[in-house]
Amino acid sequence: MAHLSRSQILVYGAVAVALLLLGARWIRSADDGGSPPGEVSFAESSGDGEAPAVGAGSGRDVVVHVAGAVRDPGVYRLPAGSRVTDAVQRAGGSTRPNATEGINLAALVTDGQQIVVPRAGGAAASTSAAGEGGGPISLGTATVEELDTIEGIGPVTAQNIVEYRDEQGGLSSVDDLDQVSGIGPVTMESLRSALQP
């Protein structure tokens, strides 16, 4: 067996230390993010999914449903702190130009939230359905004018609802509106019959 010189031992030792440091750094970076930067795992994709948001948060994931005018609608798991724009991108982006102009892309997503990217003529379709058939108005796409047609809602409350919806990045249920100023228990009852999520 050949003896190693002192300089050879030093070189091998330095290489071993460098490899240990690189390995420790790699393990630490994997522990900090859970997944490599820019990569998000998703829970399920039902074929009508939504996009995940990439961001730093509390460490808990959120599950969101992305629907409407997106390429790959479905249910996705996103990191806490994700934005609506991340969810839409995760769902493959919008299927038509300017489809996302009606939603707040900067809003934080919340667990259980549904994000609906309006389809072409989505707001007009809900207007005609509500006007002709008397059916419920879509809460995800309703305009101030449409909300103003509901009994018990005036233009100010309608504007508050639209602003609240935009801040939240959408609403998953009519019950979420109890957080809007100007909506009391009596108004909530009329909203339940006049709106759909």
Image: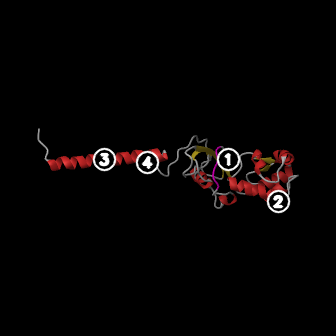
Q: Is residue 49 magenta?
A: no
Q: Earlier in the sequence, mark 2 or mark 3?
A: 3
Q: Residue furthest right?
A: 151
Rounded to the nearest angstrom, the CA distance separating label 2 from label 4 is: 49 Å
- Residue 176: where, in percent of width, then height? 75, 47
Q: Amino acid at mark 3?
A: Leu
- In this orientation, which residue lies closer to the viewer: 97 or 14? 14
Camera-near label (2 vs 1) is 2
Q: Earlier in the sequence, mark 2 or mark 1?
A: 1
Q: Which residues are magenta?
A: 107-111
Q: Which residue is mark 1?
A: 114
Q: Describe the element under mark 4 as helix, strand or loop.
A: helix
Rounded to the nearest angstrom, the CA distance separating label 2 from label 1 is: 25 Å
Q: Amino acid at mark 1?
A: Gln
Q: Describe the element under mark 3 as helix, strand or loop.
A: helix
Asked if 89 appears above or below 2 in the picture, the reply is: below
Q: Residues within 10 Å of mark 3 (few under 14, many from 20)?
A: few
Residue 156, label in figure: 2
Q: Amino acid at mark 2?
A: Val
Q: Describe the element under mark 2 as helix, strand or loop.
A: helix
Rounded to the nearest angstrom, the CA distance separating label 1 from label 4 is: 32 Å
**Is the magenta region chiefly helix, strand or loop?**
loop
Q: Amino acid at mark 4?
A: Ser
Q: Earlier in the sequence, mark 1 or mark 4?
A: 4
Asked if 140 appears above or below 43 in the picture, the reply is: below
Residue 19, label in figure: 3
Q: Earlier in the sequence, mark 3 or mark 4?
A: 3
Q: Earlier in the sequence, mark 1 or mark 3?
A: 3
Residue 29, label in figure: 4
The tally of labels here is 4
Q: Residue visible at 80% across and 48% down?
A: 195
